Image (cartoon, rainbow, N blue to C red):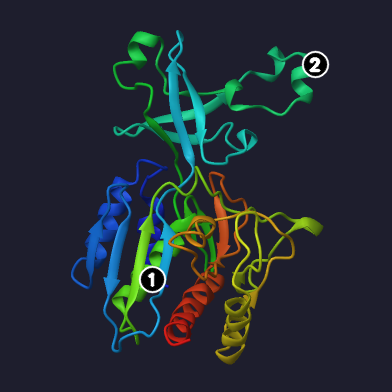
Amino acid sequence: MNREILKELCLINGTSGDEDKVREYIISAIKDLCEYQVDPLGNIIAEKKGVNRAKNKVMVSAHMDEVGMIVTSVRSDGTLTLSAVGGIDPRVVIGRRVVVGDKELAGVIGSKAVHNMTAEEKKTAPSFSSVYADIGAESREEAEKYVMPGDRVYFKSDLGISDDGFVSGKAIDDRFGCAAMIGMIRSELPYDCIFTFVVQEEVGLRGSRTAEGEKRCCELGKGAVVSYMDRSTIYDKELYQLSRKTAAENNIGWQTKTMVAGGNDSGAIHISNGGVRTIAISAPCRYLHSPVCAARLSDLEDCEKLAVKMLEKMCIL
């Protein structure tokens, strides 16, 4: 896993429907190594030639977008009302630093002060109707000089990698997948492969959340997560078993979910074009869809290694 590419990708802002800067970065990284096109929706479809012709056509896919927020109105006091773009729990955004719009104005997420809440409000979890972005404007007229409804709001976060391989920052879901695919395109592949970097996953098929305690569905440090089923897909049984065997043969960390949860682009892919045999390789991640996600570099590397080995096998099944 190229750490610099992962960091650069995660620091780019690109919510669903606003992936332009992410797309530009990816194209700059792969344009001299493969043939590619951008379809009308904004997906990148890249074809990498391998050493050999594949018996089966294999596609590797990851999404470019991240969760965030969008401005819905400007209030009389200059604060901005918001709506979530993707599955975000409003409880995790209050007090967080954000950047707003193309000018990346500095702001902070606020909510009604505790001392102004009713007893009933104190018992109720906040909703996006009760939070706002404060960019320091004193009036609607001042704010509207810089912001308008439809402007995106992004979490402000660096990407940190500790000495023991602990990775934290925004948008690891799924810029990690994009980084892994860039790495595969930059390598010499044994067989031809199609790679798709897709848009708007977060507003359709939303990622799973890794919880602590007895309801956790996977663990950091245990390797790549390969699901047998989630809320959008029942995965190909043979490919699922092949992934476990492949991981064991190549000393790659492998785990499966302990509960049926979440979903991803496989939900759309596996029912397209008359049906597609599909497998999902995911990285375990804490605090998903929040301002700061947390993952292990070793798990990310296991996902990339497993994807490469599975590509070799699936091309000749």
Up the image or down, 98 lies above or below 62; here it is above
Q: Position of residue 112 (x, y in %)?
A: 63, 18
Q: Is residue 164 visible?
A: no
* Residue at the left extreme, as displayed: 32
Ranked by sequence position, the earlier of labels 1 and 2 is: 1
Residue 2's tag is: 1
Q: Which residue is drawn at 45% across and 62% down?
A: 176
Q: Residue at x 34, y 12 (%)?
A: 142
Q: Where is residue 307 in the image (x, y as percent from the top left)?
A: 47, 76
Q: What residue type is labelled 2?
A: Ala
Up the image or down, 91 lies above or below 313; here it is above
Q: Which residue is drawn at 38% across and 71% down?
A: 2
- In-image side of 264 versus 176 (left or right): right
Q: Which of 268 and 116 is in front in this view?
A: 268
Q: Nearer the viewer, residue 18 or 106?
A: 18
Q: Position of residue 45 (x, y in %)?
A: 30, 62
- In-image side of 47 versus 83 (left or right): left
**Mark 1: secondary structure:** loop
* Residue at the bottom extreme, as displayed: 249
Q: Which residue is drawn at 55% across and 89% down?
A: 250
How many angstroms separate mark 1 from mark 2 (CA)?
A: 51 Å
Residue 119's tag is: 2
Q: Nearer the viewer, residue 295 or 95?
A: 295
Q: Where is residue 74 in the image (x, y as percent from the top left)?
A: 42, 15
In the picture, which quadrant includes the N terminus? bottom left
Up the image or down, 251 lies above or below 238; here it is below
Q: Is residue 232 visible?
A: yes
